[in-house]
Image (cartoon, rainbow, N blue to C red):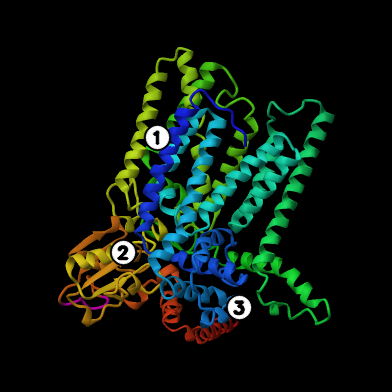
């Protein structure tokens, strides 16, 4: 991208740098004191194995880019991994790796290396990527509006709890959002001027998105939707002559094809290199002949990609929970409700202000589109089309478990603020009396956003705005909107303050809790024992109504920990009987973490395998026998 300096570029550039520094301090400071979250257990160990072994057997359900970036400093610092551990050899299988990756990842972070130092260095690249995305938001906003518009967009991004929470974590979402925005922008550049340079930039940006997340397939729907939108309503830069217009479209179609082919080659090359040492025995169907080893090796990249896509599709529909109700799969109103609960009210007010000002500008200035910089019509159209497609995909998705899956629409919504300062300036010059008040209101809302972010530190993950009406988070949201096992250090601090030698812990995770809380005993709040009477129990907020059914605990003295992520309960001297009105639930009313069926408590299954990796093969054998028995029952 090329950006011309504006008269205010030095001032806004300095302010942008200060905002990114603030974001780095807030996001990095919060993550520095958090335990390893659920998905990071699988991601960190897998990324290290990709670089150390050139073997992609672990965590195939996510493309490798984010994990490799996080693993770079660990490998450079000589992180240790024991590949003689049973979890490594066991994971060389299509479905086996989905169980083995948790065991290998847990041992890598907590047994073979220091968990605090390991997670710190793994999260450093993620934090840098988050800041890079912020700078890109600033640059794109500057191009769409002006320097002040770019600064407004950055202020919204840098203070939004979603990005402060998930930006530093070893996940795919923010990396994917970065490359999606790059793909969007380079796609618009290529459509405006389909030269070799723009095609190359587009191809590399698209490859980054494809290597970050399998949902990058939505980008192709975005491309088609954008092209169709140009037939419905042209932009000023399109030729009016029919023959010229046909040639104009044809050249851009070819550029899109060439850019996609380049992206495909890059993705293939990355998978080829990172799977160089991976066994090819899955291709035993290919008979042995002199060239068969080479053929198998050449087929490995598409085969691994296909395995990941299939595994991803198996997990793309899960039970969800919103506003106190559980559902067997995603519901359309999940993300709209989540947006209004977990987004700062100042940002929502800015969006509303931008909409009102845009309508007034159109009516007062009598211009069809006077809200963006000249020459940015295609880019503005692309932003809107991508926003609509990604939002529609989120609403229609059967996988609705976290606000982090709404990261791309959030960034695109932020970019809609870019024209606001220029519109207010133009309206002020035209004599609209309320323009100055609108400018000051914008400044106030930005300051409120900064204040909200600083005030919420360091508990960004369970953040809920005032629309929650003071209701506890466990009554409204679930999963990584509330607790993702990141608060164990806060639990340990609480245990030490109280001088406890033993505490019961019902965590929202697959990992061993004693890594961060040595006094902890793994506990299920639905199945208390007489030995638990009178003890302190710490329960994840996600286990009170969603992951488990533990509302019975709320009648006893309790404390809120880590901003509402965890709750500490003083159990009574006599625990009520199971099934009693004020007691633990009956077995039929119990719930399992992740919506698992009663006979498949994945939390216990994985924990047992973590404690003894030799249990991996017997566990998979039992699971396979269970699935076969269920299949026979259905046939009958």
Q: Is residue 228 visible?
A: no
The location of residue 69, given as percent across then percent down, is 54, 58
Q: Observer-nearest residue: 581 or 356? A: 356
Residue to which mark 2 is pinned: 489
- In which quadrant of the rendered view does residue 210 lie? bottom right
Is the magenta region chiefly helix, strand or loop?
Answer: loop
- In which quadrant of the rendered view does residue 434 lie? top left
Q: Observer-nearest residue: 561 or 558? A: 561
* Residue drawn 54% across the image and 68% down it: 48
- In which quadrant of the rendered view does residue 291 lie? bottom right
Q: Is residue 224 visible?
A: yes
Q: Are marks 1 and 3 in contact (CB under 8 Å)?
A: no
Q: Earlier in the sequence, mark 1 or mark 2?
A: 1
Query: As displayed, is residue 215 above or below residue 95?
Result: above
Q: How many marks?
A: 3
Q: Earlier in the sequence, mark 3 or mark 2?
A: 3
Q: Are marks 3 and 2 in contact (CB under 8 Å)?
A: no
Left or right of 502, for residue 42: right
**Camera-side mark, 1 or 3:** 3
Residue to which mark 1 is pinned: 349
Left or right of 616, for residue 450: left
Residue to which mark 3 is pinned: 92
Q: Circle 3 — which element?
A: loop
The location of residue 355, given as percent across then percent down, is 48, 30
Asked whether 428 falls inside the magenta stretch, the response is: no
The Cα–Cα distance between marks 1 and 2, rounded to whole angstroms, is: 35 Å
Query: As displayed, is residue 2 above or below residue 471?
Result: above
């Amino acid at each position: 991208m090329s950006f011309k300096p504006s008269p205010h570029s030095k001032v806004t550039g300095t302010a942008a740098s200060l905002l990114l520094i603030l974001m780095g301090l807030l996001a990095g400071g919060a993550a520095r004191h958090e335990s390893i979250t659920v998905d990071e257990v699988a991601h960190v160990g897998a990324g290290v194995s990709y670089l150390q072994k050139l073997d992609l057997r672990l965590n195939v359900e996510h493309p490798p880019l984010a994990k490799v970036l996080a693993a770079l400093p660990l490998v450079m610092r000589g992180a240790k991994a024991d590949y003689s551990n049973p979890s490594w050899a066991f994971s060389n299988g299509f479905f086996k790796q989905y169980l083995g990756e948790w065991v290998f990842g847990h041992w890598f972070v907590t047994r073979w290396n220091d968990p605090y130092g390991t997670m710190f260095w793994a999260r450093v690249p993620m934090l840098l990527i988050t800041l890079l995305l912020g700078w890109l938001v600033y640059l794109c906003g500057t191009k769409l509006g002006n320097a002040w518009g770019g600064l407004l967009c950055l202020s919204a991004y840098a203070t939004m709890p979603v990005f402060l929470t998930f930006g530093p974590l070893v996940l795919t979402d923010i990396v994917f959002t970065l490359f999606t925005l790059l793909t969007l922008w380079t796609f618009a550049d290529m459509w405006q001027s389909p030269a070799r340079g723009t095609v190359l930039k587009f191809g590399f940006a698209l490859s980054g998105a494809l290597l970050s997340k399998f949902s990058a397939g939505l980008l192709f729907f975005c491309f088609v939707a954008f092209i169709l939108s140009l037939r419905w309503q042209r932009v000023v830069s399109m030729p009016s002559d029919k023959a010229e217009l046909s040639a104009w479209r044809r050249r851009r179609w070819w550029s899109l094809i060439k850019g996609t082919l380049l992206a495909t080659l890059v993705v293939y090359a990355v998978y080829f290199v990172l799977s160089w040492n991976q066994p090819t025995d899955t291709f035993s169907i290919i008979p042995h002949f002199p060239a068969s080893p080479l053929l198998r090796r050449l087929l490995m990249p598409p085969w691994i990609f296909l395995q990941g896509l299939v595994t991803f599709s198996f997990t793309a529909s899960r039970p969800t929970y919103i506003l106190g109700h559980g559902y067997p799969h995603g519901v359309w109103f999940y993300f709209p409700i989540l947006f209004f609960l977990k987004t700062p009210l100042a940002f929502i007010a800015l969006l509303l202000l931008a909409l009102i000002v845009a309508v007034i500008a159109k009516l007062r200035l009598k211009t069809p589109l006077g809200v963006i910089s000249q020459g940015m019509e295609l880019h503005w159209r692309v932003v809107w089309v991508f926003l609509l497609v990604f939002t529609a995909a989120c609403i229609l998705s059967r996988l609705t478990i976290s606000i982090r899956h709404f990261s791309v629409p959030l960034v695109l919504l932020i970019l809609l603020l870019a024209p606001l300062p220029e519109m207010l300036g133009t309206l002020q010059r035209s004599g609209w009396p309320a323009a100055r008040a609108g400018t000051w209101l914008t400044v106030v809302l930005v300051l409120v956003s900064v204040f909200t972010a600083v005030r919420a530190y360091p508990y960004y993950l369970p953040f809920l705005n005032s629309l929650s009406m003071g209701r506890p988070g466990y009554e409204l949201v679930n999963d990584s909107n509330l607790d993702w096992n990141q608060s164990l250090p806060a639990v340990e601090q609480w245990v030490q303050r109280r001088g406890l030698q033993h505490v019961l812990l019902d965590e929202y995770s697959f990992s061993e809790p004693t890594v961060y809380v040595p006094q902890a005993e793994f506990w299920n709040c639905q199945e208390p024992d007489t030995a638990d009477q009178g003890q302190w129990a710490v329960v994840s907020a996600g286990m009170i109504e969603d992951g488990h059914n533990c509302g019975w605990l709320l009648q006893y003295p309790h404390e809120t920990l880590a901003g509402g992520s965890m709750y500490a309960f003083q159990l009574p001297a006599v625990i009520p009987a199971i099934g009693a009105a004020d007691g633990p639930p009956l077995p039929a009313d119990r719930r399992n973490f992740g919506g698992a069926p009663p006979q498949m408590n994945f939390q216990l299954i994985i924990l047992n395998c973590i404690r003894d990796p030799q249990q991996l093969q017997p566990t998979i054998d039992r699971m396979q026998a269970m699935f076969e028995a269920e299949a026979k029952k259905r046939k009958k």
